[in-house]
Image (spheres, grey):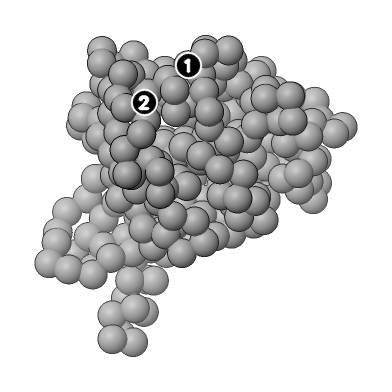
Amino acid sequence: MGRILLAACALILSISGACATSSFAWGDETSRVSSATQVMTEIMSIPEGGIPETLLRDAAGIAVFPGLLKASFILGARYGEGILSVRTPDRAWSNPVFYRLMGGSIGWQIGAQSTDIILVFRTIRSMDAVTGGKFTLGADASVAAGPVGRHAEASTDILLRSEILSYSRSRGLFAGLSLEGAAIQVNYGATATFYNIPAVVPVQVFNGTGIQVPSAAEQFKQTLRRYSGQ
């Protein structure tokens, strides 16, 4: 079992290394924010197939990971980089902070895939966990595949017991996705680079304290406002 876990870790590291050198501008934070905005717009434009507006309206936070890579050969691994915006005290959307999502799985599987991921944080408790730096989906906060459809009922058992709802888009298909066991952690380097503030911390970005907000971040917040009924 120890060898399997080591191999899973090695697979995750190899994927993250590939991301760092890919042509998709993983080092270009502005492109990453713009991609997150595009993913959100395209998914919510799917007729009767987007995230229910009621969930977005009541959400405590939303994270978007465009182009998350999933690779497997018996062992599976996911790695992606994206952004998270939270609700401010006046219910506006905050400036986004950069995050990484990574995780592994064991089973007979083979192949590689690129997937867009959206996480809808439904409670303040779930936001306290993620803004603390690093947490694990399913362990530090309950997570479930989210319902699809703008008129989906918000009173199902899944919604009542889940703090985070997860969605994915792959090859044009959009649906709920289970991400239990995946870890999310703050990408301090990308956040500092994007806002040009050394050693910046998430709470400073969320509060907007001393922050000059790039236009790409403003566009992302505007997109969240549009689809959350604001």
Displayed quadrant of residue 51? top left
Pick the residue in front: 3 or 163: 163
Q: Name the residue under label 1.
A: 227
Describe the element under mark 1 as helix, strand or loop: helix
Displayed quadrant of residue 156? top left
Query: What residue is rendered at 51% in x and 19% in y?
Result: 228
Picture quarter with the N terminus: bottom left
Query: Which residue type carries mark 1?
Result: Tyr
Q: Mark 2 points at which residue?
A: 51
Query: What residue is rendered at 46% in x and 64% in y?
Result: 139
Q: Return the disc, 1 or 2, that comes first in the chain's sequence.
A: 2
Query: What residue is rendered at 60% in x and 55% in y?
Result: 129
| Relative side of 124 to 178, left or right | right
Pick the residue in front: 135 or 2: 135
Give coordinates of residue 119: x percent, y percent.
44, 40
User: Going by the picture, which residue comes out furthest to the bottom?
Assistant: 2
> Compared with residue 182, is residue 40 higher up or lower down, i.e. above or below?
above
Pick the residue in front: 179 or 30: 179
Q: Are marks 1 and 2 in contact (CB under 8 Å)?
A: yes
> Compared with residue 193, is residue 71 higher up or lower down, i.e. above or below?
below
| Relative side of 56 to 151, left or right | right
Query: Which residue type carries mark 2?
Result: Ile
Q: Can residue 150 be seen in this view?
A: yes
Give coordinates of residue 15: x percent, y percent.
37, 57
Query: What residue is rendered at 34% in x and 78% in y?
Result: 5
